[in-house]
Image: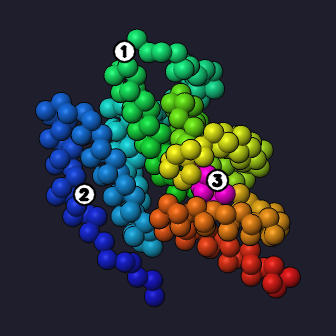
């Protein structure tokens, strides 16, 4: 018999996050409102995961609504209709990165802009994961648009670790969608960008995420020795950074690769 783990997300969402969000919106504290909206959306997603055995999709709908509201606070709109998706996709594909390498006229404004772009990336990542939970053609179109918008926001931020993490996530999304060309393209871009990421903690984390994704790819393709080598390298970085959740993902790939190699 299927059972769900104990969860207090519903109470936290109703009694804490929702009132705090409304309060911040009323008093004009948009930054705080954004964080509470994102937390509320994440709580709704977790709640939907716990209730998935009952097919309670209402929480996913609520999470998408909250993520859209958070995006709106960040001056980034996400369409509601299929026509809006088509139009926004056209705009995103015509998007060109505005270079941030030139000295800004106002450093504080540039810092604020970078923070907003990073928040957009987080929000769009959550949004495509929400749409990806619904196995319909319409949801797939919305999810694909969210990934494209996330990619553009990451590029505009010009933060290499952010860009690498985004390409890793998009490669996994494309793999799940069965889009091999896009999947391999995103992996290639992540590898190219990763060469600039070794000099910070965030960069090392992005590198570990990339190695974990590549280890899984090589496992799927049957390149077991390569998968195992990548897995061990990723595990060492995870242990150095004290990232047990990512290390567990790496270990799951390592176990399967080692088991198949020993068996065959």
Secondary structure under tag 3 reads helix
Label disc, if present, on residue 13 of the rendered structure: 2
Which residue appears at 24% of the width and 57% of the height? Answer: 13
- Disc on the earlier residue, 3 or 1: 1
Label disc, if present, on residue 106 of the rendered structure: 1
* Residue that label 3 marks: 210
Q: Is residue 234 left or right of residue 57?
A: right
Of discs 3 and 1, which sits in the foreground? Answer: 1
| Residue 148, x across and y down, in percent | 59, 36
Q: Marks 2/3: CA distance? A: 33 Å
| Residue 110, x across and y down, in percent | 40, 22
Residue 29 vertical placement versus 179 (above, below):
above
Q: Residue furthest front?
A: 199
For the image, the number of numbered tags is 3
Which residue appears at 30% of the width and 52% of the height? Answer: 40
Badge 3 crowding class, 10 Å Cα cut-off, few under 14, some 14 to 19, many 20 or more, is many
Residue 63 vertical placement versus 78 (above, below):
below
Q: Is residue 143 visible?
A: no
| Residue 17, x across and y down, in percent | 22, 52
Secondary structure under tag 2 reads helix
- Disc on the earlier residue, 1 or 2: 2
């Amino acid at each position: 018999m299927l059972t769900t783990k104990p969860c207090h997300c519903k109470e936290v969402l109703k009694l804490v996050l929702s009132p705090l969000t409304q309060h911040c919106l009323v008093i004009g504290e948009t930054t705080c409102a954004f964080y509470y909206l994102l937390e509320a959306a994440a709580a709704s997603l977790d709640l939907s995961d716990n209730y998935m055995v009952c097919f309670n999709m209402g929480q996913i709908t609520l999470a998408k609504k909250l993520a859209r509201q958070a995006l709106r606070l960040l001056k980034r709109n996400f369409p509601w209709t299929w026509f809006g998706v088509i139009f926004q996709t056209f705009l995103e594909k015509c998007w060109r990165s505005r270079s941030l390498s030139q000295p800004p006229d106002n450093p504080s404004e540039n810092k604020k802009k970078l923070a907003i772009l990073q928040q957009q990336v987080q929000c769009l990542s959550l949004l495509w994961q929400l749409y990806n939970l619904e196995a319909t053609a319409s949801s797939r179109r919305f999810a694909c648009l969210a990934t494209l918008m996330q990619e553009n926001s990451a590029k505009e931020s010009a933060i290499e670790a952010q860009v690498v993490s985004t390409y890793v996530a998009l490669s996994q999304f494309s793999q799940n969608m069965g889009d091999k060309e896009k999947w391999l393209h995103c992996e290639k871009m992540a590898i190219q960008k990763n060469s600039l990421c070794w000099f910070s903690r965030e960069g090392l984390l992005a590198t570990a995420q990339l190695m974990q994704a590549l280890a899984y790819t090589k496992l799927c393709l049957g390149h077991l020795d390569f998968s195992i080598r990548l897995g061990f390298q990723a595990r060492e970085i995870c242990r150095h950074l004290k990232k047990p959740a990512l290390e567990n993902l790496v270990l799951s790939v390592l176990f399967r690769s080692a088991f198949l190699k020993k068996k065959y």
